[in-house]
Image (tube, rainbow, N blue to C red):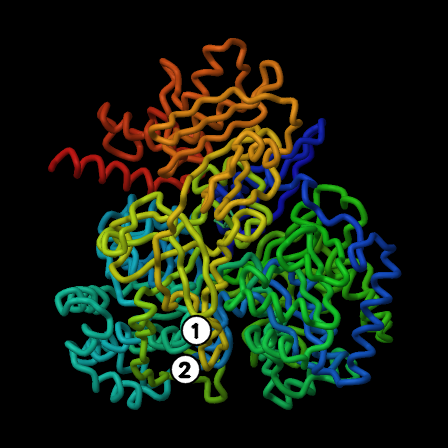
Amino acid sequence: MPVETKTTCPYCGVGCGVIATVNDNGAVSVKGDQDHPANFGRLCSKGSALAETIDLDGRLLYPEIGGKRVAWDEALDLVASRFSEAIAEHGPDSVAFYVSGQLLTEDYYLANKLMKGFIGSANIDTNSRLCMSSSVAGHRRAFGADTVPGTYEDLELADLVILTGSNLAWCHPVLYQRIAAAKAARPEMKIVVIDPRRTMSADIADMHLAIRPDGDVALFTGLLAHLSHSRALDRGYVENHTAGFDAAMQAASGYSLPEIAEATGLTIAELISFYELFEHTEKTVTCYSQGVNQSQSGTDKVNAIINCHLATGRIGTPGTGPFSLTGQPNAMGGREVGGLANMLAAHMAIESAEDRDRVKRFWASPAIAQKPGLKAVDMFRAVADGRIKALWIMATNPVVSMPDADAVEAAIKACPFVVVSDVVAGTDTARHGHVLLPSLGWGEKDGTVTNSERRISRQRGFLDAPGEAKADWWQMAEVGRRMGFDAAFAYRQPSEIFAEHAELSGFENAGSRDFDISGAERDSYDAMTPFQWPKVGPGETGIPRFFADGRFYHADGKARFITTALPETRRTSPDYPLTLNTGRIRDQWHTMTRTGKSARLTAHIAEPFAELHPRDAQALGIESADLVELESPHGKVLLRALVSERQARGSVFAPMHWNDQFASRARIDVVVAPVTDPHSGQPASKNVAVKATRFEAKAYGFAISRTRPNAPDCAYWAIAKADGGYRMELAFKEEPQDWALWARQFFGLDVRIEPLGYSDRQTGDLRLAFFDGETLLAALFIAKQPVAVARNWAISQLGQRHEDLRMRFALVAGRPGAGRADPGATVCSCFNVGVNQITAAIRDGCHSVEAVGKTLNAGTNCGSCRAEIRGIIDGCLKTAAE
Ligand code: SF4
């Protein structure tokens, strides 16, 4: 009998409910959980492909020391002794944990407890520092606590939804679908997208403001002044529930509209129409994510937004409020347990002696940390300069994701003792670990996560632990016990950790702290259904929105206006004249260690790219499909050029996902400067000065192979999973003497396998195909220009039998045979529908997303591609009209 398990998606902060089914033959399938209040059955393309990412290929299955398999006891003893020795010799601040929003709350809780409560240092920070720490700092400044006031329902109830620095369509697709559905039901609902790029989210927007990078403080400071001038303030609310208004307003009024226009790059007309829309729309929600947070002025941006909501009293009521959307599945859970270096457990403050004493007593802790620890960028600086002697990295890949990534890699390499707990064996970071500890992955581990609307859900295991992999909480408990803290780390299961976490949240709380889940039913951990915090008493459903009563968490119960000065935002110079903006793409997650396993997901965008405006590209002599080198003082990357009107002039966008396993030189954080927001310590990953140069290649290549080829000896390569094998893009500075020999080595083929070849001396085109009987093993397409062969058609050849010579010659000719049209680049991953098929349907009269869906099914399952389909329709209709 198939067995169904209710669990939660491990990707973004939407926190969608998933039902995983293990069938009689062991095969796993997933679908959205209709009962989960985050998604009501929807899943995006990444969530829908979860079952394709749980194989054991590339998994770390056994503990290792120095690359050799060892027993758990040996590995754990070594970790405990090396950490204890470092602490004894150099003090508690000589060790550090760098953890992750991928950890479950129970894992996170123990990491924080071990470091802050028992080692006695606060040197634990998390990759959530790179994601939403500016929101945390902004919330704490304004509300006195890190509180997200609203719920997802508010996005549907609002009459105006502002998405600033948030490409919801690609980064939080199910929330985007909820908003799109609400707008379809109430077309009068307005959506404003504020983003330097015309992202896919802009396709349902009534207004797109192509703001200058980091212009948000100016935009919302100008809005505050406008609200005052137009008498749109809620004076009663400001008077009764806030403090600091006069100073903030005085500062805001000091900027003229032309100054705001200059600082934002928007026209005065654009500013006025946005300001008037806000002024006249009571039910307004302002959503923001990494475009706001990842900035040198990220915290001020958050407060500039909150200021406008406080000034109008638009907070804590249905359809209103500022709304921080977290990137990671458990960034919120990490905040709840105090996983950031400058926080304490259960939303208590490390700066507060009272809070430190409370947590110390609760934990019966021998040595509670007395001061904030090192934030991520500073932590790796301390690793680099030798202050950190022992580092434990859990569930994250800082060699790819940290700014100045090459320097971070060098620091980790030089660190005397590095432990890496991970699911994947060969990450860019794991290759430098002295000790590798195999962790349980999604589908194997048990615990809880919290999504962006404060909803706690269970992640449940439905697969056996592979090899000797163990839960992260177990690894930390074992090390804690070996360091001499037996009683405090004697957990047998995650429910015990959750119970302690819940109890601490209510300990001496009595309404003084926002985070309180002491009413969570501990005895029904296994059966837990999703609930929003706070949950103070058993059976209580919690309050849906914070601050409905106008009471905040500062000592006087009032919220704070924060005075925001306009920051210096220009980072470019004559040497580095372009602004790099890094971010996510629709179908990949973080550093691709999981989503890179799905051929369906890599079909959408198979290569790292740099998106440039056509006029910038022209000025640089770059055409679409050329290779482009991006360079900053910190390093260089090599990416495929994508020339697009969606990009703002003077800016370049590049995805954050690619690592050294999937491309030769595409870790984009290599070029990102390690500059941070002064309040939050969050790196500024969206405003980086770079220069772009066309890469002169002697030859370009495209290859398909049934098996993963060897890392090639060439200037550029990018590899992706494809149906039936792998696909590779290649470029060469020098051409090999013997292409057949090169190809055999690259594909790992026996020298006796002779290729079927075609070459054209005039054009320089060369094609080689290697067969084993009727089975295509691999093929290589070489050209002087970027190879023009239809990618999806070529990949489909891996699944064909090539019975006769005619079929084989069609392959080396690089052309689909008669009746085999090339579907084009994949748009709909669920039904594998390509752009050429959609364009053909539009030509045949399908002029709406629904009509395209009816004809091709595209966009009718997860819906993640609906924005792109809409964009293709608009583009085709515009071209037809010209
Ligand atoms: Fe997962 Fe997609 Fe839902 Fe995010 S929106 S939680 S990635 S299914």
Q: How crowded is mark 2: few (under 14 residues within 10 Å), some or many (20 or more)?
A: many
Name the foreground residue: 78 vs 513.
Answer: 78
Image quarter (top left, top right, bottom left or bottom right) of the N terminus: top right
| Residue corresponding to mark 2 | 559
Q: Nearer the viewer, residue 510 or 98?
A: 98
- Residue at horizontal 42 percent and vertical 51 percent from the top: 639
| Quadrant placement of the C terminus | top left
Q: Residue at x 27, y 75 (%)?
A: 218
The answer to whether any part of residue 510 appears in the image is no
Classify residue 603 as left or right of residue 193: right
Image coordinates of residue 558 in percent, x first then y, are 42, 84
Look at the picture and state if 693 lies above or below 546: above
Identity, as a three-letter code, of the amino acid under mark 1:
Phe
How many angstroms separate mark 2 from mark 1 (CA)?
A: 10 Å
- Looking at the rendered structure, the secondary structure element under dot 1 is loop
The residue shown at (47%, 56%) is 656
Task: Please say if the residues under marks 2 and 1 sit with CB atoms less than 8 Å apart.
Answer: yes
> Image point 37% across, 55% down: which residue?
167
Find disc 1 in the rendering and name its residue: 547
Residue farthest to the front? 737
Query: Could you tell whether 687 is left or right of 488 in the image?
Result: left
Q: Position of residue 92 (x, y in %)?
A: 74, 83
In the image, residue 553 lies at what x, y percent?
A: 49, 81
